[in-house]
Image (tube, rainbow, N blue to C red):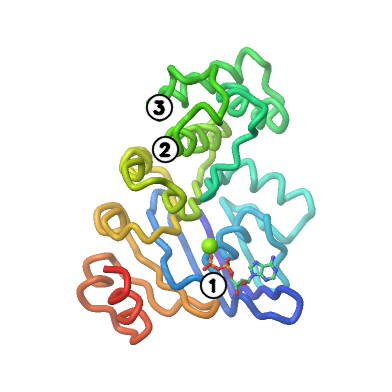
Amino acid sequence: MIEIQALNKWYDQFHVLTDIDLTVAAGERIVICGPSGSGKSTLIRCINGLEKIQKGRIVVDGIDLTAKAGNIDAIRQEVGMVFQQFNLFPHMTVLQNCMLAPMRSRGISKVEAEALAVKYLERVRIGDQAHKYPSQLSGGQQQRVAIARALCMTPKVMLFDEPTSALDPEMVKEVLDTMISLADDGMTMLCVTHEMGFARSVADRVIFMADGTIIEQSPPEQFFSNPTHEKTRKFLGQIL
Ligand code: ADP
Ligand code: MG
């Protein structure tokens, strides 16, 4: 589903990602962790074309991101993204938030878009909030709306960038439960998160990044019980 080869990215002179190779199969669940500033957000932003890459290749579901300018739009339609800060449109209702992208970029009718929105809002168990504005919802509810909004594009891959980091502790579980249920449905997922309970129970593979490279990757049992790299051990010591 995702094929990344020798990806390198710079922010001006700063070499933020170095020689990243990563292959993700359809239905695979990947958790990415690592210290702040290690390039996790940059990596997943590259996958849906939010960041330019200077070297290497990214192919999503057979579409080569860098081959043609139009491919960025094609990939964005297949890749849903959920951010730490929800990024809902504040002046639109929950329903309108979910209807916008499918109408604009898939060209579907208002009626169809509304039906899709209702379906996915119910999917994240928030159908009863459809006519509220984001500011009238709790953080956990807003994040579930953000997940529903991404699902309305019927993506093949979902990217999550620390989706629970901005939430009050009592709201973390409802968002993780939503993510677990997506995983149970077979969604291909890349999740940047430090929720190690989630990683243990859901991830097929845990990837540890430091200084813009992938230092180690392994199934969760091995990752937590027997990390091979000193940096991984240090990191786990700090967060567990
Ligand atoms: P993480 O998500 O792992 O915390 P980021 O991908 O956000 O890391 O950032 C990796 C590094 O790139 C950090 O040193 C950060 O300061 C830098 N960086 C991130 N975004 C930009 C940007 N737009 N311009 C310049 N440097 C950036
Ligand atoms: Mg980040």
Q: Residue 129: where, in percent of width, then height?
A: 47, 20
How many angstroms separate mark 3 from mark 1 (CA)? 34 Å
Query: Please, what is the three-letter code of the amino acid marked with disc 1?
Result: Gly
| Numbered label attached to residue 37 | 1
Residue 166 can be seen in this image: yes
Left or right of 148? Residue 111 is right
Query: Which of the two residues, 133 or 160, is positioned nearer the viewer here?
Result: 133
Kindly identify which residue carries mark 2: 140
Q: Residue at x 69, y 61 (%)?
A: 51
What secondary structure is found at the residue carrying circle 2? helix
State which tag comes first along the sequence, 1 or 2. Answer: 1
Amino acid type at image mark 3: Arg
Residue marked by disc 3: 123
Q: Quadrant of residue 74?
A: top right
Say whether disc 3 or disc 1 marks the residue closer to the N-terminus.
1
What SS does tag 3 mark? helix
Split into quadrants, the picture shows ligand 1 in the one at: bottom right
- Compute the Cα span from label 2 to label 3: 15 Å
Q: Residue furthest top?
A: 111
Q: Is residue 26 visible?
A: no
116 or 186, nearer to the observer: 116
Q: Are marks 2 and 3 in contact (CB under 8 Å)?
A: no
Amino acid type at image mark 2: Gly
Q: Earlier in the sequence, mark 2 or mark 3?
A: 3
Q: Nearer the viewer, mark 2 or mark 3?
A: 2
